[in-house]
Image: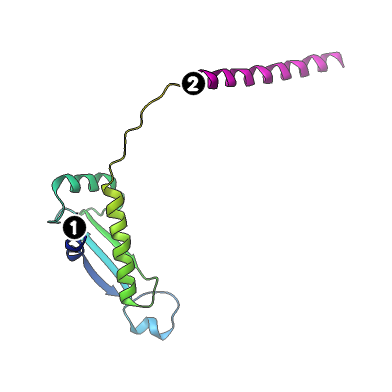
Amino acid sequence: MNVESIIKELSFKAIRSSGAGGQHVNKVSSKIVLTFDLLASENLNEDEKELLHKSLKTKLTKANSIILTCDESRSQHKNKEIAIDRFLEIIKKGLVIQKRRKTTKVPRSAIKKRLNSKKKLSVKKAHRKSQMLNN
């Protein structure tokens, strides 16, 4: 995965940010909306696209694009950098193939411990019953 070429495929849109900031917020478009079309990407091969589609299906739109917004800073450039960093982190995590979990047998000691604790509890409760009958 070539980071520079993927960054070139991103499209950005600057819009007015909401929240505190007074008149500055009303004049300046500092919020950044980052859009990446997964299926139209030329820098990702088909296997990577399929893997990203599976791992990021909750973050994808119906048109198979990733949309991120950032309005943390009052600077448009800073928001753009933050959005790019977030996007690259999402893509890197999405491309990691998770190892299959190996099923293991429950250790004999764990089974013994569980049964012993059950036995202790039943003895304690049985002892309570016999005390109640004696009183």
Q: Is residue 131 part of the magenta span, yes or no?
A: yes
Q: Nearer the viewer, residue 127 or 91?
A: 91
Q: Nearer the viewer, residue 59 or 49?
A: 49
Residue at mark 1: 2
* Dot 2 crowding, Cα within 10 Å, few <14, some 14–19, many 20+: few
Give the side of residue 93 with respect to residue 3, left or right. right
Q: Quadrant of residue 116?
A: top right
Residue 67: mark in rendering: none
Instruction: Count the numbered circles shown.
Output: 2
**Amino acid at pointer 2:** Pro
Which residue sits at x=38%, y=26%? 103
Question: In x, y percent, where is residue 53?
Answer: 23, 47
Give the side of residue 65 with respect to residue 74, left or right. left
The quarter of the image holding the N terminus is bottom left
**Amino acid at pointer 1:** Asn
Question: In x, y percent, where is residue 117?
Answer: 63, 21
What's the CA distance linking mark 2 and mark 1?
Answer: 46 Å
Mark toward the start of the polypeptide (2 vs 1): 1
Q: Quadrant of residue 38?
A: bottom left
Residue at mark 2: 107
Question: In x, y percent, where is residue 71?
Answer: 37, 71
Which residue sits at x=30%, y=70%? 80
Which residue sits at x=32%, y=33%? 100
- Residue 71 vs 64, above or below: the answer is below
Q: Secondary structure at mark 2?
A: loop
Q: Is residue 75 part of the magenta span, yes or no?
A: no
Magenta span main SS: helix
Q: Secondary structure at mark 1?
A: loop
* Dot 1 crowding, Cα within 10 Å, few <14, some 14–19, many 20+: few
- Which contiguous range is marked in magenta? 108-135
Which residue sits at x=82%, y=17%? 131
Q: Nearer the viewer, residue 109 or 90?
A: 109
